[in-house]
Image (spheres, grey):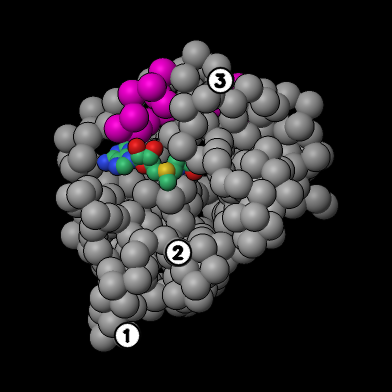
Amino acid sequence: MALFGARTPLDLLRDYRKRLVTTVSPDDQMVLRFDDAAMARIGEKSWQDQYFRVGEAALRAIVRAMILAEKTELASILDLPCGHGRVLRMLRAAFPAARIAACDLDRGGVEFCARTFGAVPVHSEIEPAAIPLAEPFDLVWCGSLLTHLDARRYAAFVDWFIDRLAPEGLLVFTNHGRWSLDYHRTYPYIDEDRFQAIAAEVAEHGFGYRDYPHQPEYGISIALPSWVMRLVERRRDATLLGYHERGWGHHQDVVVVWKKPIDVPPGLDRPRPAIYRGHHEKFAPGAVTG
Ligand SMILES: C[S@@+](CC[C@H](N)C(=O)[O-])C[C@H]1O[C@@H](n2cnc3c(N)ncnc32)[C@H](O)[C@@H]1O
């Protein structure tokens, strides 16, 4: 019997291109505006090649998360931060019927995503607690936001995202991990003094952060997998499903969190075939009723 029925999450990677909207906003900050020499140094052919490849790499990470959770459909999706839709366009093409909320501080980006990809526009706030969103989502995708935040706001966003998940919903977020300590040498994230300060904090605490010059509370963070794991471990209402180093296009790490309590014996949170009941009675005495 096929685990996923006729259509598997992997089919999404083949099918999405038929529906992909390729209009790119002139204001999109994720378009690489480098000269040829700089492009060659980072091994890129063209901005279009890089832009769409990174977008698809996010979809691949999400499909891998769906496979881990044995999910075939996503009816509601939050993309925060959506920017000008580098990834949101992929989500729209892969999940044409989904309700997709596009959320960012960049109002132009939010409006572009609403207009171009039929997303629900949501204007964000600096602090997650102030973001006007209460409804639950089957998927929260957060690409390249926590990579710019200090430890306090990083943790606040992870908690807020988990709180926004529907039961068995997926949070997929990205992190500057071990590879970022090397990647900076080819494509500097920030000036060298600040980078050295970040690297020293990572060596001591597993997490380092500095503001960009003249941008208070927005900069570059790098976190070791063990630091991120400790953050997720605080949440007993969630299960850590995956940590994939360099899982977003061989660059940022991808973390997958499932909104499923860690302490529920298998089968107790969903209708169970009677055949398994003996197992539960044996391993979780008193926990099985009905
Ligand atoms: C590096 S870009 C990534 C954009 C998009 N995820 C992508 O991959 O194309 C970071 C984005 O985070 C947004 N941002 C920063 N702080 C935010 C916040 N508190 N809420 C929502 N978006 C935020 C910025 O406006 C910017 O669009």
Where is residue 288 drawn, in percent x and y? Answer: 41, 62
Q: Which residue is mark 1?
A: 203
Are the residues flagged by discs 2 and 1 in contact, CB closer than 8 Å? Answer: no
Can you tell me whether the CB of the residue at mark 3 lies under 8 Å from the nearest atom of ligand 1? no
Q: CA distance from mark 3 to mark 1?
A: 42 Å
Q: Is residue 105 magenta?
A: yes
Q: Which residue is mark 3?
A: 117
Where is residue 124 drawn, in percent x and y? Answer: 27, 31
Are the residues flagged by discs 3 and 1 in contact, CB closer than 8 Å? Answer: no
Give residue 188's mark: 2
Q: Is residue 279 magenta?
A: no
| Discs 2/3, front | 2
Q: Is residue 285 something one can see in this rendering?
A: no
Asked if residue 216 lies left or right of residue 81, the reply is left
Q: Amino acid at mark 2?
A: Pro
**Image quadrant of residue 41?**
bottom right
Span colored in magenta? 95-111
Where is residue 262 drawn, in percent x and y? Answer: 38, 65
Compared to 57, does 151 lie above or below? below
Q: Amino acid at mark 1?
A: Ala
**Within-10-Å neighbours for mark 3: few <14, some 14–19, many 20+:** many
Mark found first going from the N terminus, 2 or 1: 2
| Discs 3/1, front | 1
SS under mark 3:
helix
Residue 43 versus residue 143: which sits nearer the camera? 43
